[in-house]
Amino acid sequence: MADARPRTALESAALDSLFSSARTHNVLGGSIAPETLHALYDLVKWGPTSANQSPARFVFVTSPEAKKKLEPALSEMNRPKSMAAPVTVIIGYDLAFHEKLPYLFPHTDAKSWFEGNDALIRESAFRNGTLQGAYLILAARALGLDVGPLSGFDNAMVDELFFAGTSVKSNFLVNLGVGDDGQLFPRSPRLPFDEAARIV
Amino acid sequence: MADARPRTALESAALDSLFSSARTHNVLGGSIAPETLHALYDLVKWGPTSANQSPARFVFVTSPEAKKKLEPALSEMNRPKSMAAPVTVIIGYDLAFHEKLPYLFPHTDAKSWFEGNDALIRESAFRNGTLQGAYLILAARALGLDVGPLSGFDNAMVDELFFAGTSVKSNFLVNLGVGDDGQLFPRSPRLPFDEAARIV
C-alpha cells in the first residue's frame, strides 16, 4: 500500500526527544526565564481544540511564596520534587470557556451550543483542557525542557488556593526544569500494539 | 534570569510543523500504510500517563466496510470528511485499564488504588486517555501527516458499534491523511497570554 505524506517526518533525534527517549523526571533543577514560559504558551495555544474552545488556563508557579502556598495541596510523595522544580504549572480548565467563543470561533454562534448545558460544558472543558495539557508537555520537551507531570494532589484545595471566586478548576500539574538523568527509575513497559490498537 | 535547558530546542521548522503553522484539516486524502500506523502507535505509547496507566485504546478505521459502519454515528457535518480521509482513528479509553497495571507499573500494587472506585477509574481513564489522544495528534504531525480531530459524533453509538461487550468507551476521533491547504478556513484567533495564563 502506498504511503503519501504532506511533509517529511521530523528527524529521529526530534522524535526521540519528544517521545521515544523522553522520560518523566522526578528530580528537576535549573531555572526557567519568564520569556521561556511565554514562548511555551505561544506554542501550546496553537494546538487544536474542539471549536477552538481553548478552555485550559495555566498558572506558572515560580516564586518561593507561591510554591509554599501550593505545598500543602500536594501528596507527600509529590512535595519535595515540586518544591525543588523551578516551575510547577497548574493546568486548569475554565467552566466559562464558552463566554470567549464569540472571539475564538467568530463564524457561528458556538456559545449557544453550551449555554445551560452543564454536563456538556464540563465534559468539553475537561477533554479539551486535557488536550492542551498534553500539548504543554510536548511543547516543553520541544523547547528543550524536561517535564514531570503529576495528578497526586488535592484538586479542591488547589482550586481554593489559586482559583477562588473564578470558574476555573484544576486538572493536573506539570513540573518543568532540567532533569537529572542519574535519578531516573528504570523505564516501565508499554502495551504492545495488539493490546491497545487494531486496524479495521 | 538565567535559563538552563537540558537539550537544545527543536528547529523552528519542526516547531512550526507541530504547533505554530499546523492546521486542523477538513479535507484529507492520500493513503496511509499499516506500517505507518504501527510507527505512530510506537511513538504515542511513550507519552507519559499517571502511573503509566496507558488507558487509551485506538481503532484505526481504514476499510470501506468499517468506514460505512462508522458513518451513521457521525454528525452530518463530520460525515463526508471522515468518509474521504484514508484513516479515522477512534480514540477510546478502557475502564478496566487498572487490570493491566501489574504489568505496566510493576514496582507497586497500583491496581488496588483503583479497584472498586468507579469515579476515580472514570476520571483517570478520561484524563489519561485524552492525554494519549493529544500525543497521537502531535505524533501524527511529527511523522509528516495532517490531522483533523473531531468530537461531533454519537459516542454511545460508536461504543455499541466498535466496543460492544468490552470495557472501552469512545472519547474523540482523529482523521489522518494528506491535507488540502487550499480548503483550509482562515485561522481562528487564540487567547493572549494574559487571558489564559499567569506567572506567580
Image (cartoon, coloured by chain):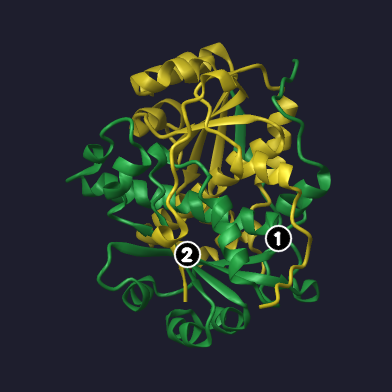
Chain colours: A green, B yellow
Chain letter of the residue carrying label 1 = A
- For the residue marked with disc 2, what is the amino acid? Phe
**Chain at numbered mark 2:** A
SS under mark 2? strand
Give the camera-side residue of B20 and B128.
Answer: B20
Q: Return the residue nearer the eye: B38 or A116.
A: A116
Towards the viewer: B110 or B5: B5
Above or below, B52 against B63 in this view is below
| Residue B28 locus on image (x, y percent) | 57, 20
The amino acid at mark 1 is Ser
* Residue at x-position 60% and y-position 19%: B86
Residue sitting at 69 percent across and 64 percent down? A145
Question: At 45% across and 17% down in the image, what residue appears?
Answer: B69
Instruction: Find the distance from the CA under tag 2 to the CA under tag 1.
Output: 21 Å
- Indicate the secondary structure of the residue bearing disc 1: loop
Task: Give the mark nearest the N terminus, 2 or 1.
Answer: 2
Near mark 2 (Cα within 10 A), the count class, few <14, some 14-19 or many ≥20, is many
- A178 displayed left or right of A160: right
Q: Is residue B106 above or below residue B63?
A: below
Q: Which residue is mark 1?
A: A188
**Horizontal side, residue A164 vs residue B38: left or right:** left
Q: Quadrant of residue B29?
A: top right
Q: Which residue is mark 2?
A: A172
